Amino acid sequence: MLLWSLLLVLELFPAPGLTASPLQPIEGSSVTLSCNTRLPSDRATTQLRYSFFKDGHTLQSEWTSPKFTISAIWKEDSGNYWCEAMTASHSVLKRSHRSYIDVERIPVSQVSMEIQSPGNWGIEGQSLVLVCSVAKGTGLIMYSWHREDTKESVGRKSQHSQRAELEIAPVKESHAGGYYCTADNSYGLVQSAVVTVTVKVPVLDPVLSISVPGVLPFIGDVVELQCEDKRASPPVLYWFYHENITLGNTSAPSGGKGAFKLTLTAGHSGNYACEADNGWGRKRSEVVPLNVTEPPPKVRLVNGPHHCEGRVEVEQEGRWGTVCDDGWDMKDVAVVCRELGCGAAKHTPIAMLYPPVVDEALPVLIQVALCNGTEKTLAECDQVEPFDCGHDEDAGAVCEAVLPSTS
Ligand SMILES: *[C@@H]1O[C@H](CO)[C@@H](O)[C@H](O)[C@H]1NC(C)=O
Ligand SMILES: *[C@@H]1O[C@H](CO)[C@@H](O)[C@H](O)[C@H]1NC(C)=O
Ligand SMILES: *[C@@H]1O[C@H](CO)[C@@H](O)[C@H](O)[C@H]1NC(C)=O
Ligand SMILES: *[C@@H]1O[C@H](CO)[C@@H](O)[C@H](O)[C@H]1NC(C)=O
């Protein structure tokens, strides 16, 4: 009785056959293994279990479906595959023959490298990605990135992928140069062309300076505002501000300073700042204050009893000198008095009245002043250059106002 039933079960189904689809897969593709057997029609409802094996190890055991899919198969997965079919009770187990699956590897070719960053350059302080890719090639690919000058490796990665990324962060100026990558999936190394990496330096810290012609900024002076960010990559655009109002902008196409000229008026006192931008964020400088003052007088009355009486002295190009009394009249004195804030003209005395006599080293600067009397300053009057005047002819002035001497 036992023997009879055993025989019956042994003949329940024939040994399965293993088929693979496709039979010669390319690396990375999927493969479906089928474990095919046939139950006799009177036992068609018997549940079978399937196990799949490769060489010495189990891929899947006691699977309820006769099909098993390997989603991505690699060269290393080449080998002998087989399957088993058995009843749920394990009483009958039948094994297939072995089938060899040969996975085809495609060698890498057409290796290329590119910079993944807008504008194709690195920006100092940010990150830069070098992408190495192959047009063809399967399996595990070893990617390696190199500097062109030293051939030194800057990174390696093994990936089951036709592209790999190397991130350089943070980018420094020293990272500029030529780079290439190589790819290899064990058929030999293939190298990309060289790609040049340029590193741009963003604006970091612009500095404003104001150059004045003299020691202090006076009304009427032409001053130059200069803005500079020493390391920023050109071109740099600079803006200049007075109390946050834009004065203007200038560009430095090849780097360096941006300059802006300004003729000072009394309203130009206050705080100045500049901004610089070369495309990666605008930065503002520290504030620089400027105190614009009235220019010092170009005329003075010397040795008199007070500010508004004495020998007339004028300043030209930084040196003081006297005025000859040739043609010296009330119109000239009126202008001097007006310029000094001393009211109307009163007399046209000779300078001898205000001893001591001038030091001989002091020049005579004006021979004849041709004022019409309405000028605001003596400098506005037409003048005749001195030719034969001595200090015994120096001119003086008396104005109506009596003001204490300022110096
Ligand atoms: C100018 O702008 C800066 C920054 O935008 C601000 O801090 C400052 O208060 C402003 N100054 C004036 C006078 O508006
Ligand atoms: C620069 O200044 C000029 C006027 O001088 C103005 O037309 C232009 O819009 C300014 N450019 C920028 C970017 O501010
Ligand atoms: C500007 O200069 C004048 C004259 O020297 C002085 O009286 C004034 O206090 C200064 N103002 C500032 C803001 O420094
Ligand atoms: C006086 O001289 C000033 C400066 O040269 C000139 O602007 C003005 O018109 C002159 N006035 C007369 C009345 O000649």
Image (cartoon, helix red, strand yellow):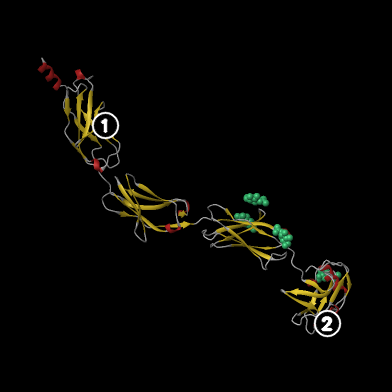
Q: Position of residue 29 (x, y in %)?
A: 30, 39
Along the line of sight, the residue nearer the viewer: 108 or 203: 203
Against 309, residue 210 (above or below) is above
Which mark is first along the chain, 2 or 1? 1
Q: In which quarter of the image is the N terminus?
A: top left
Along the line of sight, the residue nearer the viewer: 45 or 377: 377
Against 368, residue 140 (above or below) is above
Q: Is 171 on the left-hand or right-hand side of 352?
A: left
Q: Residues within 10 Å of mark 1 (few under 14, many from 20)?
A: some
Q: Name the residue under label 1.
A: 68
User: Which corner quadrant of the image does residue 395 belong to?
Assistant: bottom right
Q: Is 209 on the left-hand or right-hand side of 317?
A: left
Q: Which element type, helix, strand or loop, lies under badge 2?
A: helix
Q: Where is residue 90 in the image (x, y as percent from the top left)?
A: 19, 23
Contact flag, marks 1 and 2 (Cβ < 8 Å): no
Q: Is 144 on the left-hand or right-hand side of 341?
A: left
Q: Mark 2 points at which residue?
A: 393
* Picture quadrant of ligand 2: bottom right
At horizontal 37% and vertical 50% (from top left) the residue drawn is: 132
Q: How crowded is mark 2: few (under 14 residues within 10 Å), some or many (20 or more)?
A: some
Q: Which element type, helix, strand or loop, lies under badge 1?
A: strand
Mark 1 or mark 2, whichever is nearer to me: 2
